[in-house]
Image (spheres, helix red, strand yellow):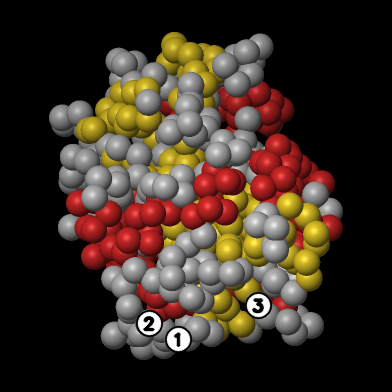
């Protein structure tokens, strides 16, 4: 069973449907006890950093997530759900994130060639021995939609993509994983990544 | 490497694909999900479903379709046709669409663009623009499927849509649509020079070179076609190899 956190953060259907397509049961919930007792926890998210943190806090989900993560069971944040793992974001400068990682989320600089938001398929530069990307080929493509990004030099980045700057496409540290891109919208490659997560112990 | 996108467009009426589809091994060539999956496998980067259902239960048919697509297709998809209100947008996204395309309703009520962008994010607001050249060489936008000349300059409208919060523009040349003589590069270039959001070229594609032109000279991030792909006049993989060899970055997986 994959527990998907429901906190009014846009389209949560797609990731549930992708997991169900792979044969996993999903539970969409905003209940703190369900979150703490999950075996696999997934934090999706589309929207703004500050609003999303507000929504989590209102429900006490910020503390529930931190408690879950301490248990050592696998956690995956997707898109904004990955950014929320960090301490701060230029998108909402006065708001503190979940702070599981101490780093700042920045605005993509952008140019005539590299438009913001970064929308579309980009290739991955995957670090060796990544568990999240097991079986994924170097240079495979995934689908991104975002304006803010984790700088690719952050120590726990396990895959990066180029978009005028080096973007942290995914992070991996112990039991905590995050994808800036949308695995649920990245075709076969994305489904494989979700399957890797769902199979983690 | 960031890549340019190739997007097949499917016209859907009463839950069925209406334009001819020439895929082999399809059990049901009229089923949008089968056709969409086939395009996913063929290398499409994204899909656009244009719902042209006119019956009284069009809304219900559309939402049912979106739900079914979202269960089986795991690349981004846009749904257009008959989306008029914030509630229409909310329902369509909730059933699993990644983006909605608005056209006539946005012309009549431009606030729909800003409200949609504010509530659901710019990334899901695609403004579709049907443009036709006038006798003085400028372009006007048309509404109601190209039936009514609004007397509004297409480039000005594109800029306005962008400023209101559109995440992408889907620009169709009514002059070129169906001709297979190429996209309207003049129209596309005028628009891409003035906005800083992705523009999807539509209308007129007939061969590989036309896509190349739209993605280079035209300044577009993506190019869309319908019958060209449906009738297998062009294979997406072959098209992408052509583009790659010409130096355009595309998503090409073996």
Q: Is mark 1 on a helix, strand or loop?
A: loop
Residue B98: x and y in percent read: 55, 53
Residue A41, quarter of picture: top left
Q: Which chain carries label 3?
A: B
Pointer 2: what residue? Answer: B231
Pointer 3: what residue? Answer: B52
Q: Residues within 10 Å of mark 1 (few under 14, many from 20)?
A: some
Pointer 1: what residue? Answer: B20
Q: Residues within 10 Å of mark 2 (few under 14, many from 20)?
A: some
* Between A83 and B122, the one nearer to me in the picture: B122
Whether residue A26 sits left or right of residue A131 in the image: it is: right
Image marks 2 and 1: residues in contact by CB distance under 8 Å: yes
The quarter in which the N terminus of chain B is drawn is top left
User: Is circle 3 on the same chain as circle 1?
Assistant: yes
- In 3D space, how far apart are the residues under numbered discs 3 and 1 (Cα atoms)? 15 Å
Residue appearing at x 32%, y 78% in the figure: B233
Q: How crowded is mark 3: few (under 14 residues within 10 Å), some or many (20 or more)?
A: some
Q: Is mark 2 on a helix, strand or loop?
A: loop
């Amino acid at each position: 069973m994959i527990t998907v956190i429901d906190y009014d953060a846009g389209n949560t259907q797609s990731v549930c449907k992708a997991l169900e397509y792979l044969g996993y049961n999903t539970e969409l919930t905003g209940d703190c006890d369900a979150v703490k007792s999950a075996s696999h926890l997934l934090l999706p998210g589309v929207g703004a950093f500050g609003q999303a943190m507000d929504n989590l806090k209102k429900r006490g989900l910020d503390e529930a997530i931190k408690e879950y993560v301490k248990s050592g069971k696998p956690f995956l944040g997707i898109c904004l759900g990955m950014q929320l793992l960090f301490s701060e974001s230029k998108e909402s400068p006065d708001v503190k994130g979940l702070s599981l990682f101490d780093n700042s989320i920045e605005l993509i600089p952008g140019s005539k060639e590299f438009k913001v938001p970064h929308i579309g398929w980009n290739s991955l530069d995957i670090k060796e021995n990544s568990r999240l990307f097991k079986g994924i080929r170097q240079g495979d493509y995934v689908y991104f939609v975002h304006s803010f990004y984790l700088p690719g030099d952050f120590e726990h980045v396990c895959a990066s993509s180029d978009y005028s700057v080096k973007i942290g496409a995914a992070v991996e540290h112990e039991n905590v994983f995050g994808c800036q891109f949308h695995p649920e919208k990245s075709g076969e490659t994305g489904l494989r990544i979700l399957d890797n997560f769902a199979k983690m112990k | 490497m960031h890549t340019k996108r190739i997007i097949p467009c499917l016209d859907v009426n009463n839950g069925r694909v209406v334009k001819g589809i020439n895929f082999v091994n399809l059990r049901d060539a009229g089923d949008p999900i089968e056709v969409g999956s086939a395009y996913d496998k063929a290398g499409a980067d994204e899909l656009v479903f244009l719902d042209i259902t006119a019956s009284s239960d069009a809304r219900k048919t559309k939402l049912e379709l979106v739900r079914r697509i979202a269960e089986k297709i795991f690349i981004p998809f846009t749904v257009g046709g008959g989306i008029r209100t914030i509630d229409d947008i909310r329902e369509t996204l909730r059933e699993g669409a990644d983006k909605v395309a608005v056209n006539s309703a946005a012309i009549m009520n431009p606030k729909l663009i800003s409200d949609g962008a504010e509530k659901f994010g710019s990334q899901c607001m695609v403004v579709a623009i049907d443009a036709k050249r006038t006798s003085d060489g400028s372009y006007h936008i048309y509404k109601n499927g190209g039936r009514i000349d609004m007397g509004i300059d297409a480039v000005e409208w594109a800029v306005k849509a962008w400023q209101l919060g559109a995440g992408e523009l889907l620009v169709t040349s009514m002059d070129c649509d169906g001709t297979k003589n190429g996209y309207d590069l003049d129209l596309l270039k005028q628009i891409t020079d003035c906005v800083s959001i992705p523009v999807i070229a539509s209308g007129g594609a007939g061969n590989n070179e036309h896509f190349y032109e739209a993605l280079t000279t035209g300044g577009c991030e993506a190019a869309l076609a319908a019958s060209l792909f449906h009738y297998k006049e062009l294979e997406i993989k072959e098209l992408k190899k052509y583009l790659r060899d010409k130096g355009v970055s595309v998503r090409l997986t073996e």
